[in-house]
Every structure is written in C-alpha cells, then in structure tokens.
Image: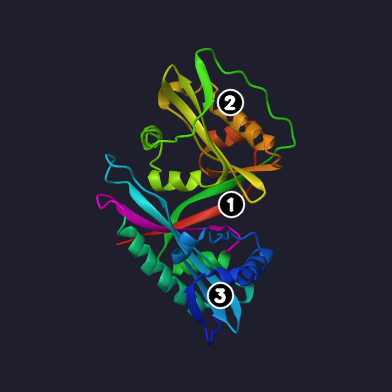
Amino acid sequence: MSQPSTEVFIRNFQIEDMPLLGALYQSVTAKENAIFWWVGDEDNWSNVYCAFENGKMVAKGQVSIISTVPPGHSKENNHSIFVNLKAIPERESDIDLLDKIYHYLLIRANHLKETLPKEYGTILCVGNNSTETASNQFFIDKGYRHLNSLFNMSRDLNKPIPELILQEGFQFSHWKMESSREEREYLDIEAEIWPVGFYRLSEYKKNKLWTSMVIRQADTVVGGVMAWQEEDYGVIEDVFVREPWRKRGIAKYLLTQALRYLKSHQLQKANLMVLTTNNSALSLYESVGFYADKEEIRYFIELN
C-alpha cells in the first residue's frame, strides 16, 4: 500500500549529508540484504539524489554508466546505465516518494546517454537482490523487463587455496595498464568475450588494491582477471580465457592467483558475480572454494 509523502525535498548529495547517509544505509541494510550503492567521490555527486523529510534522509537514488561498447562491434550491442534507488523500510512502498527521485534519475540517465557513442543503443538497468520484492516490483510496474540473474559467490580466504602449476609455455604476470595504448589493447582482447568499454575499466582501476593479472603465450595475452578491495573484502572480476586457449586450466590458475593476492593483503573474504545460467563458470568457481550466497535480479528498459 502506498503511503503519502509530505514536505519531501530532493537535491544532490553534499558532504554535510554524510551522517544522514550513514543512517539511511544502516536502516536499509538492517532489514534485508539490499544492494546499496555508496556515493563515491565528489565528482560523482551530480549522479546522486537524496530525499529529505523533517531533517532525515528518507531515500537516495543514483545513476551510473556501467559499460560502454567499444567501436567496431555489432550494432546489436548496447551501452548500459544502471540506477540504484533505496528508501527507509517504512517508505519502501511509498510510490510517490520513489517516483519523485526516479524522475531525477531518468533525466540524469538521459544526460549521460548523450555522452556515449551514438552508433549503439543504451539500456537503463537496475539490479536488486531477489529478496527486495518491493523495489523489484516498483521497476516492473514501470515497464522494466528481466535482463538476467546473477549469483553473488563468496570465498573464505582463510581456507586453503589450491596450489596449481601453469602449463609449460605460458607466463603469468600482473599488468598495470599504465598507458592508454595498453588499456586499448586489453579492451580489444576482452571485447572478444564481452564489451566492457573504457569507462568501466577506468572505474575498476580507481578501486583500492586494483590489479590486473594475465597469462601470456609468448607475447599474446590468452587470459586475464582483475581483483581489488571494496570495504573489507576482495572482489574478483572479468575472468576470461580466449577461445583457442580454453580447457587448459588457465582460468582456474588465474582465480587461485587472484585469491592469493587478496589474501596477501589480509582480506578475509573474496566475492565475485556469475550468471545463474552459466553452469560451467559455476562449476569452475565452486572448484576453488566459492559458494553462492545471494541472487541479484536485473531488469532493463531501452533508453530512447
């Protein structure tokens, strides 16, 4: 049942809002395992909209470019922009409140869309845990359609990590990608599997402890993985092996190296995301100690 909202004031996040933001985070995440985006650095606050009522932050919305399609790929590919919208538990079904913030998010999403290469379409997406039924229903009612579902998988870094040997002829190394040429080389390789785009790579590289690890055969990159720290846990992202080099244990070796890297920095847990339908990847991750503990459901609309 919708509840009327009164005297709600919405504006972009400001530094003095930090205590109120912390209170909102505690309120939202105490009820259920909600996906709550942090506001990031000051240069991101133009993408963050907060709703205040009687001196309290009652809701927050954010929008962000998540992936861009590099030039030269199929026109069927889309850039993706995501939104995240959360309200305090007693207002999570207040459609009037949520609509007011969503209005700002949609305008901002269209502004961001105009900065992206025009030869591809753009989809506007949202991802919530499967338990966030009210939030999911809000977006379904706005015409969002199911995009995909992912498992969040966790791994205890205090448990033994398998000792693996890389096949002869392959070399493992960290790749810092310090030049734009190296970044473009990486993106061209990775786009064989999925188009992440420069924007997302630059966002990854801002994370604490970020590193890229690759395996080469001679001078050819055949597989890679990224790892970094978020809050008090490690994240593993973009595990890939190029088609001609699959089924040689390369992905499993990369995963164990990423786990060792995170553990070496005294982190206790590592997380990664995988499509619920990707059975081969699920088996791979389970083989090195990961287990599924949450499911995220993603929805989308075309941003025209």
Q: Which residue appears at 68% of the width and 36% of the height?
A: 263
Quadrant the C terminus occupies: bottom left
Q: The residue under label 2 is which amino acid type?
A: Tyr
- Residue 61 in the image: above or below residue 211: below
Q: Amino acid at mark 3?
A: Ser
Which residue in the protein does label 1 denote?
Answer: 295
Front one among 167 and 115: 115
Residue type (three-letter) at the residue carrying disc 1: Glu
Q: Which mark is residue 253?
A: 2
* Residue nearer the viewer, 253 or 281: 253
Q: Is residue 127 visible?
A: yes
Q: Going from the N terminus, do you reach mark 2 or mark 3 first?
A: 3
The magenta segment is 116-132
Residue 170 horizontal/vertical position (percent): 50, 17
Q: Residue at x 50, y 81 (%)?
A: 9
Count the numbered circles shown. 3
Q: Which residue is mark 3?
A: 93
* CA distance for labels 1 and 3: 22 Å
What's the distance in space between the residues labelled 2 and 3, CA to CA?
A: 46 Å
Residue 240, horizontal then vertical, whole percent: 48, 32
Which residue is more in the foreground, 228 or 223? 228
- Asked if residue 77 lies in the magenta stretch, the reply is no
Query: As drawn, is 240 to the left or to the right of 87?
Result: left
Residue 287 in picture, x, y percent from top left:
64, 31
Instruction: Give the secondary structure at mark 3.
Output: loop
Task: Tell whether 265 sits left or right of 183.
Answer: right
Residue 115 percent location from the top left of the image:
31, 56
Element marked by disc 2: helix
